[in-house]
Image (spheres, grey):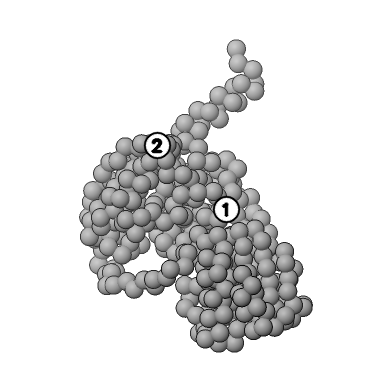
Amino acid sequence: MFSPFNRQLLFYTQLRRLQSTLVIAEHNNEVLLPATQNTLSAAKKIGGEISVLVAGTKCGPAAEAIAKANGISKVLVAESDVFKGFTAESLSALILATQKQFNFTHILAPASAFGKAVLPRVAAKLDVSPITDIIGVKDANTFIRTIYAGNAILTLEAKDPVKIITVRGTAFPPEPLEGGSAAVEKAPEGEYKTDLVEFVSQELTKSDRPELTSAKNIVAGGRGLKSGDNFKLLYDLADKLNAAVGASRAAVDAGYVPNDLQIGQTGKIVAPNLYIAVGISGAIQHLAGMKDSKTIVAINKDPDAPIFQVSDIGLVADLFKAVPELTTKL
């Protein structure tokens, strides 16, 4: 006879075996984006069998890379010109067809522009509520996410039969792409072309600096820089630190820098080892995107700026004097 504890343990073990998760890989056909590895780490915390869907035009290299990750049962690959530009309309149709065939209990994607465009469509079609931007997993039905611009932590228990989840990459360690050899199979075939949208072209910004969401060091500027030309001060400092350059929404709205540099609640969420905030007052929306950084350094001439409340090191000084001096001493 099993004791009550052993019966409960057996029940949860069997339940975990019944769990099955589909991770939607984000990539550029040749290389997996780091957020996919973070999402895979979250999937492992949920437990059960894990499959990965890789869709693109010539995405063989990306599929081979993710197949090497430990703990994946299979990699489903869909290659077609239909997926050019990774449009949400075509990808959501593929995900729904895959779900119909395999009946996953969880579908996960990074909480990036990619994941936020695709998974809400899937959730609507499946008539379930999406669970967005999770930062923790308690069990297969219970997840942790932030609310009120990061000022409160919510523990959420999902009752839907299929959990549609986007994962905040900075909250989970990247899963190494080694130690495994998952089977690579074809994804369900079908007519995924749509007349709702047509991909025309894409212009990507090329930079020798690290990508913002995966950078270990970040130098960010705000409205205190007064113009886009003055961001050169930050570029020079970033080059010394091998850092990425970011900006507050105020700086982006003022036209100083393009919006792909925006950090905050409506921009990118980052958690580097070192975050240097220059001329940033520290609005609550900006803090929501960077306050998980390991070390925060703030440079601002206003001693009452909210950024000093979350900073580890604060310098009350004129940034136009402090930043060049700091750069020359590095």
Q: Residue at x 57, y 73 (%)?
A: 237
Q: Residue at x 52, y 65 (%)?
A: 242
State whether residue 265 appears in this view. Answer: no
Look at the picture and state if 141 lies above or below 15.
below
Mark 2: few, some, or many residues within 10 Å (few <14, many ≥20)? some
Looking at the rendered structure, the number of numbered marks drawn on it comes to 2
Quadrant (top left, top right, bottom left, bottom right) of the N terminus? top right
**Can you identify the residue that label 1 sits on?**
171
**Can you identify the residue that label 2 sits on?**
180
Look at the picture and state if 258 lies above or below 21.
below
In the rendered image, which quarter is residue 10 located in?
Answer: top right
Q: Residue at x 72, y 67 (%)?
A: 313
Q: Secondary structure at mark 2?
A: loop
Look at the picture and state if 157 lies above or below 205.
above
* Foreground residue among 3 and 53: 53
Quadrant (top left, top right, bottom left, bottom right) of the C terminus? bottom right
Residue 218 drawn at (x, y percent): 57, 67
State whether residue 198 appears in this view. Answer: yes
Amino acid at pointer 1: Ala
